[in-house]
Structures are given as structure tokens and as C-alpha cells.
Image: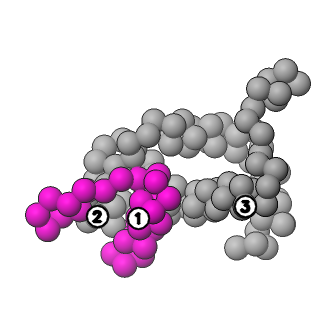
């Protein structure tokens, strides 16, 4: 196990680098954004399809999609009056898969973590 950990990229040692990494994880730290990422990783989707899939208002979905686009996790293109969203980077889908695996192995601990629950 120790050999595997030594091959991981280091968490940035500078405060700005750590803050950037934390911002990346905060972009993933919303259930609606995770649902949108998974939905847009499977196929290109319109904003209306995203609204129907997640079940939130159009304004809320637009805000979540804007976050994902501005963070570079989702790309968008306009065609006429429609905007289409998709995940271009296969590492995003891999990250989601790894997160599902991690939470499956630690579900009880994560659910019981009072610190994470209190930071929302």
C-alpha cells in the first residue's frame, strides 16, 4: 500500500494550490451537480433534459451547470436557441466511478461524519 501512495501526485504545498484543489472538490460537493455530471457524461444533454433529470427549477439547474462549465468539468455549445452540455474529459467519469467505489466501502463512516454535515 505504501508504494501505491508514493505514486500519487502530491497535494500542493502552497496555500493557493491547496485552495484550488479544495475548490475543485467543492464543485463536486453537491448532489445535484453530481447527478448532472453523471447525466452529461453518458450523452450530450440540453438544459431542458437536465431540468427534467434532476427535478430542480430551470434557474437552479442553470446555476449548477454554470458552475460545472466554469470549472471545466462540463462543456457547452449553443445550437439555435438550445444549449447542449457534455462531459468531454473521460477522467471526470473515472472520478465519479472512483467516488462511488470509495463511498461504498466507507458509507457508514461518511454518513456519520458530523464535521462534513456541519460544513454545509
8 is higher (above) or lower (below) than 33: above
Q: Earlier in the sequence, mark 3 or mark 1?
A: 3
How far is mark 1 from mark 2, CA to CA?
9 Å
Disc 2 marks which residue? Answer: 47
Q: Secondary structure at mark 1?
A: helix
Give the residue displayed 41% in from the left and 64% down from the top. Answer: 65
The image shows a total of numbered marks equal to 3
The crowding category of the residue bearing disc 1, from other C-alpha atoms within 10 Å (few below 14, some 14 to 19, many at least 20), is: many
Q: Secondary structure at mark 3?
A: helix
Q: Which residues are magenta?
A: 55-84
Disc 3 marks which residue? Answer: 16
Q: At which x and y percent is residue 26?
A: 63, 62
Q: At which x and y percent is residue 107?
A: 74, 47
Whether residue 75 appears in this view of the structure is yes
99 is higher (above) or lower (below) than 78: above
Please name which of the two marks, 2 or 3, marks the residue nearer to the observer. Answer: 3
The crowding category of the residue bearing disc 3, from other C-alpha atoms within 10 Å (few below 14, some 14 to 19, many at least 20), is: few
Give the residue displayed 79% in from the left and 55% down from the top. Answer: 14
Q: Which mark is residue 65?
A: 1
How far is mark 2 from mark 3, CA to CA?
33 Å
Kindly indicate whether the residue at mark 2 contacts the one at mark 1 (C-beta within 8 angstroms): yes
How far is mark 3 from mark 1, CA to CA?
25 Å
Amino acid at each position: 500500500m505504501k508504494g501505491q501512495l508514493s505514486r500519487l501526485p502530491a497535494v500542493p504545498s502552497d496555500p493557493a494550490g491547496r485552495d484550488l484543489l479544495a475548490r475543485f472538490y467543492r464543485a463536486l460537493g453537491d448532489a445535484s451537480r453530481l447527478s448532472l455530471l453523471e447525466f452529461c457524461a453518458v450523452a450530450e444533454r440540453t438544459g431542458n433534459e437536465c431540468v427534467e433529470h434532476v427535478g430542480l427549477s430551470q434557474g437552479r439547474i442553470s446555476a449548477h451547470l454554470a458552475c460545472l462549465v466554469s470549472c471545466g468539468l462540463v462543456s457547452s455549445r449553443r445550437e439555435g436557441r438550445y444549449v447542449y452540455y457534455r462531459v468531454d474529459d473521460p477522467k471526470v467519469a473515472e472520478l465519479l466511478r472512483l467516488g462511488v467505489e470509495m463511498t461504498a466501502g466507507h458509507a457508514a463512516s461518511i454518513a456519520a461524519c458530523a464535521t462534513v454535515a456541519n460544513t454545509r
